[in-house]
Image: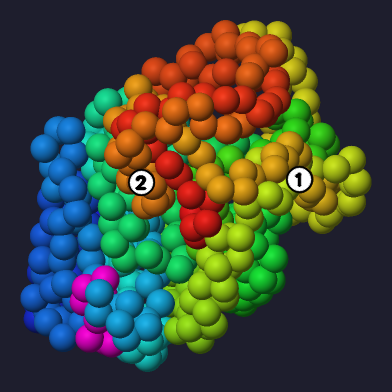
Amino acid sequence: MPSFAPLLLASALLPMAAPAQEAPLTTVAERSGFVQTGRYDEVIALCAQFAQRYPDAVRCIEFGTTPEGRPMKALVATRSGAFTPEQARAKGFPVLLVQGGIHAGEPDGKDAGFLALREALEGEAAAGALDRQVLLFVPVFNVDGHERFGRWNRPNQRGPEEMGWRTTAQNLNLNRDYVKADAPEMQAMLALVNAWDPIVYVDLHVTDGAKFRQDVSYQIEPVHAGDTQLRADGLALRGAIVDAVAARGAHPLTFYPSFVEEDNPASGFVDGVAPPRFSHGYFQLRNRFGMLVETHSWKEYPVRVKITRDTIVALLEQTAAHGSDWLADARAADARAAKLGGTAVPLDWKATGKVRTVDFLGYAYTRTPSDISGALMTRYDEATPQLWKLPLRDEIVPGRSIVAPKAGYLVPAAHAAWVGAKLAQHGIEFRRLDAALPAAEVEAFRAAEATFDARSVEGHQRLDVTGSWKPESRDVAAGALFVPIAQAK
Ligand SMILES: [Zn+2]
């Protein structure tokens, strides 16, 4: 029988069924069985339609404009009545920010987020959770990149059929931009974050890499780094999310699954703390939780969206249950951070040499020279599951540390404009000196060695400096900035 015949029969038998495209608040992804994903006009439309359908629970807001002129949309969803940052703060409700599409070729968060949100609003998932929190849902962060749409933007990713592009229209990778904040999109996001102060910031991605059966990884900080009390909370949160998705059939990891030696599974893994140019390295410095979620690119799109949806539902439940405690612990961490003057502060983190062996859900594989390049190539047999025993180094300790100044930092007047703008973007407090400080007794950093990287990164040149802080007498001109150490950030 020709394969189309059953389809014709099915539609003939269901004359009353509404055409799928009229189903309210569904995505192109959902209606296509997660074969396709929608364009950004769908995000704009759904944002408005959710607000229209749930006037008591959803607002659609615009928090920026991209370099190509597109609106940056977010949905504010809550049944607490707190639809503004001021109301959320006054009522003491935790804010959960869920972000899709920072890499727009990885649209799982957009399609899973709309699905989870509709189910939560209909009481089909995370029942009651929106009574006790505010969900900020950003379906697509890299909007211009999302509209650079094509079939082969993610060649090692199983679906959807077409997808957006990794970087912005200015070719900036937003998940390398949290600290330098060059992108107008990032500056808009930081303003949204400064206003709402989310206790958890969830960044939804899809990995690259080798073939294996593990289908999602979660990295949260504070866990290895950051405030001690928040580390305990972060560990508990990570454990709860892992348990929730595993109970629904996923195979989660708590470290990023890229091999120490590229393409060689036997080389195993090293865990670490991401530097703050990444989302999950940045938020721990603000004493808030940053969570990186990476579904595995070799899993089919319907599977990935389901896992991401389950993750968001679990996060809603966890935030409803523990958000108030996290807020109290975050405030205590802020107070402790304001007393760091004169104490040692780690600047980065590293794994020790301590190795443990972990079970890893892999496939049988061979490593043989490629016919084309001659280089060693790994071929995986997806028909033959295998349990790998792999080395993992995940004991994390501080790398380099500095002693924080007892009072704060002075930024010379010549650099006050751009440094001040950057500090303001991060919500860091500072004040401008109205009068000069002649012969001020300060400490100044003098570099004995300075080495530039051979390559630039997004228009910047990295610089390694070795040197020390020494007492000096300096004439500090009016217009210099003073950045007090006694503040949360
Ligand atoms: Zn990504």
Q: Tell me the quarter of the picture where residue 462 sits.
A: top right
Mark 2 residue type: Arg
| Residue at (75, 28) in percent of width and height | 261
Q: Tell me the quarter of the picture where residue 136 sits.
A: bottom left
Q: Nearer the viewer, mark 2 or mark 1?
A: 2
17 and 410: which is toward the camera: 410
14 to the left or right of 207: left
Q: Which stretch did the figure color magenta?
A: 77-85
Where residue 60 appears, as percent x and y from the top left, is 15, 66
Q: Secondary structure at mark 1?
A: strand
| Residue at (61, 65) in percent of width and height | 336
46 and 415: which is toward the camera: 415
Q: Counting residues from the N terminus, which is met first, the one under dot 2 or under dot 1?
A: 1
- Relative to 407, does residue 467 appear above or below in the rendering? above
Q: Secondary structure at mark 2?
A: strand
Where residue 20 appears, as percent x and y from the top left, is 16, 67
Q: Tell me the quarter of the picture where residue 370 sits.
A: top right
- Judge whether residue 81 is colored magenta: yes
Q: Which mark is residue 398?
A: 1
Residue pointed to by mark 2 = 431
| Residue at (53, 12) in percent of width and height | 455
- Relative to 166, does residue 120 appear above or below in the rendering? below
Q: Which mark is residue 450?
A: none
Mark 1 residue type: Pro
44 and 413: which is toward the camera: 413
26 to the left or right of 34: left
Give the Cα distance between marks 2 and 1: 31 Å
